[in-house]
Image (spheres, rainbow, N blue to C red):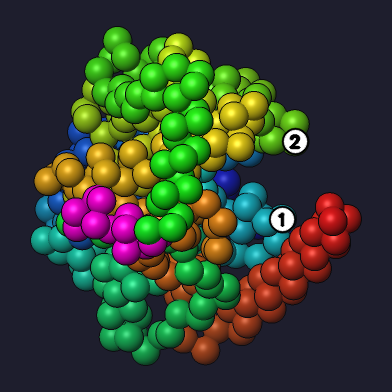
Amino acid sequence: MVDIAHQAAINPASARDAVTARAPVPLAAVDTGQWRALAQRAIEPNGYYLPAWELAVSATARGRTDALALAAFDGTSARLIGLMPVVSLWRALKIPLPALVSAHPYGTLCSPLLDRDAPLEAAKRLLQQAREAGAHALVLTDVALDGAAMASLKQVLKRDRLKPRILSSYIRASLDATQDGDALLREALGAKKLKELRRQRHRLEEHGSVVFEIARSSDQIGRALETFLQLEASGWKGKRGTALVQHPGDATFIRRAVPALAETAQCEIVTLRAGATPVAAGIVLRHQDRAFFFKLGIDERFAKYSPGVQLTLDLTRHLCADPAVASADSTANADHPMINPIWRGRLAIGDVLIPLRRHDPVVALIHGALVGLNAAHEAARGVVRRLRK
């Protein structure tokens, strides 16, 4: 088995050198100024592939370190027009076949960054670089199926008489933030549910005045982040050992990424307090005109007052009142019981297998291995769900 992604990193080059080196490069080798400029011009926003976030993930996050990059430059080799963080199929899924897979950025969105001024050229060059690195396929995980980046890739593939295959898909909640927040909530939840939530909020006020806080500045964001981390670890995620602060690499990543993005107004932390007690907090990323609801932590001692829902109601009003935000991606699981009833917009998300050569028997092997692995994971999840009942 040849691990093409790691083999490509044996002789690290700069991202611009990859045009001639014909290999993915270490993600850290991509010029951050070029990366930021590309993010500003991206045809489709993805807060999880902003450099301050993804570089922090790749540096220390558990199971997500040492990502590589397919980096596409224009004809002059001077301007970065496309970026796709990747790892090998072996690294991602322990499948010994020559393919590259989206590097998972902790948030559930891996749509690549393509320059809106040259999206087809960017897509073409990314696919060509993957071919020249020895990959027979690309596997895009958690990609927006109806997004502009996927549309550009499909168009380039169609020219080459290639067709992507959807491996799995689901629908998740999103928010149309161009609407009036209160009107949107009335339509989504109805008068009876909102009355019940107001009753819970009044009960919560018995513990102190209920205040919704937004931390943006560097002096606010650090304290708010530690509050979030404590809340997340105090609940079921802490009991399962999946809270960010429970793993040194994850804690280092989030403490590096959040302040860095806050400096460019691309991250904020929202907190709901009852008196001096924080009862819920969430991290929200921003890229272009879209917000991304990364994670939520609550104090489960106040669960009967629905603190997570109360925070999300305030966040909804906050985002709808901000003219810079047109939409928000919940980045939540399908049928999420908390966010789905509140944010009624929907996004189609999926894993997509992109063949890189026509009539390639290796792609059939890759497809079969991925389908088999998905079936095994579904069976395992079914067993876990039954055990938890």
Please provide percent x and percent y for residue 132: 42, 63
- Would residue 335 be seen by someone viewing this image from the given angle? yes
Q: Which mark is residue 240?
A: 2
Q: Which mark is residue 267?
A: none
Instruction: Tell me which segment is drawn in magenta.
Output: 179-190
Q: Amino acid at mark 2?
A: Arg
Horizontally, is 97 left or right of 25 in the view?
A: right
Task: Report the residue that reaches farthest toward the right.
Answer: 387
Please give the count of numbered marks on the rendered protein: 2
Please provide percent x and percent y for residue 319: 25, 44
Please provide percent x and percent y for residue 1: 71, 59
The secondary structure making up most of the magenta span is helix
Q: Secondary structure at mark 2?
A: helix
Q: Residue at x 34, y 27 (%)?
A: 212
Magenta-span inclusion, residue 186: yes
- Would residue 66 be seen by someone viewing this image from the given angle? no
Q: Residue at x 50, y 30 (%)?
A: 203
Q: Which mark is residue 94?
A: 1
Magenta-span inclusion, residue 308: no
Identify the mark nearer the N-term, 1 or 2. Answer: 1
Q: Residue at x 36, y 54 (%)?
A: 329
Q: Residues within 10 Å of mark 1 (few under 14, many from 20)?
A: few
Image quarter (top left, top right, bottom left or bottom right) of the C terminus:
bottom right
Tell me if residue 221 comes above or below residue 250 in the rendering.
above
